[in-house]
Amino acid sequence: MDDGPPRRNIKLVIAYNGTAYHGWQRQADGIDTVQERIEAAATDVLRHKVVVFGAGRTDAGVHASGQVANLYTTRLSIPLRGLRRAMNSRLPRDIAVVSAAGVPEGFHASRSAVGKTYRYRIHVSPVRPVTLCGQAYHYWRPLDVAAMRAAGRRLLGRHDFLGFATSAEQRENTVRTVFRCDVAEDDGSVFVTVQGDGFLYNMVRNVVGTLIEIGRERWGPERVDTVLATCDRRQAGPTAPPDGLTLVCVHYDPADLRA
């Protein structure tokens, strides 16, 4: 039985500013996405049609410093450092391939992932931060960071997070584990960092929207318990805008990365 020509599986770590794009995932003709740009650059360099498999979709306006994708190529001898450089020379200034590494045939950027880390930046100031336009959510009122931090700790553990999903969520299993939900202040901004084994549609942005409501003292930290107990989206805060959200890291079992 002919299994086809030998091929390599290559893992890419990708950073991008998502302001100009309609998200990560390839869409209809004429709609600019990050995946489409990466595939075009890889196809040009490798001289054959390339399909890139991403670790997950990011919405329009969402950024990444550690998005992961993998691709297959029959170009067995091309140096990975050369591939990265050549792709970057063909990509726009707001997208970059950070690294390229060989991985086992069975590695898949999405299916092999065991977790992700997101960070959301809220710039707290009466004056909008023009130099952070598109990269942070501007909130003009003071926020009670201690209350937000206490609320974030209530998210830790394994719960049904349906109350933090949007109506577009189609998955039957809405139980996820959150390992980390930190709230910290730095340089006039509040950063919310969330790590979990997986996330529902808009879950992080809905968590942030809820924490903001708690930070402005509309609710107490125990509101998180109510959302988790009722699984009622109406009990949570509004969906925070995409501007402040960055996919920081995708986590894998080290054994799955050994080529």
Image (cartoon, helix red, strand yellow):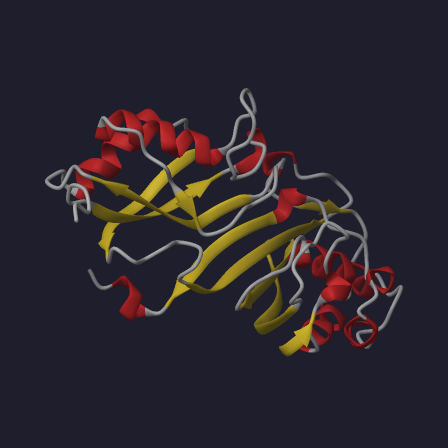
Front-most of residues 21 and 221: 21
- Quarter of the rendering occupied by the C terminus: bottom left
Front-most of residues 59 and 192: 59
* 39 horizontally vs 168: left or right: left
Q: How many marks?
A: 0
* 105 horizontally vs 165: left or right: left
Q: Is residue 215 above or below residue 57?
A: below
Q: Is residue 118 above or below residue 91?
A: below
- Identity of the residue furthest to the top in this view: 30
Q: Position of residue 47 (x, y in %)?
A: 22, 26
- Identity of the residue furthest to the left in this view: 77
Q: Position of residue 55 (x, y in %)?
A: 45, 52
- Identity of the residue furthest to the right in this view: 218
Asked if residue 143 shows in the view, the reply is no
* 81 horizontally vs 29: left or right: left
Asked if residue 154 shows in the view, the reply is yes
Q: Quadrant of residue 177?
A: bottom right
Q: Is residue 207 above or below residue 80?
A: below
- Identity of the residue furthest to the front in this view: 1
Identify the residue shown where x is 82% and y is 61%. Answer: 233
Q: Position of residue 228 (x, y in %)?
A: 77, 73
Q: Is residue 90 above or below residue 137?
A: above
Q: Position of residue 51 (x, y in %)?
A: 36, 37
Q: Quadrant of residue 80?
A: top left
Identify the residue shown where x is 27% and y is 43%. Answer: 72
Identify the residue shown where x is 22% and y is 31%. Answer: 46
Identify the residue shown where x is 60% and y is 61%. Answer: 199
Front-most of residues 6 and 4: 4
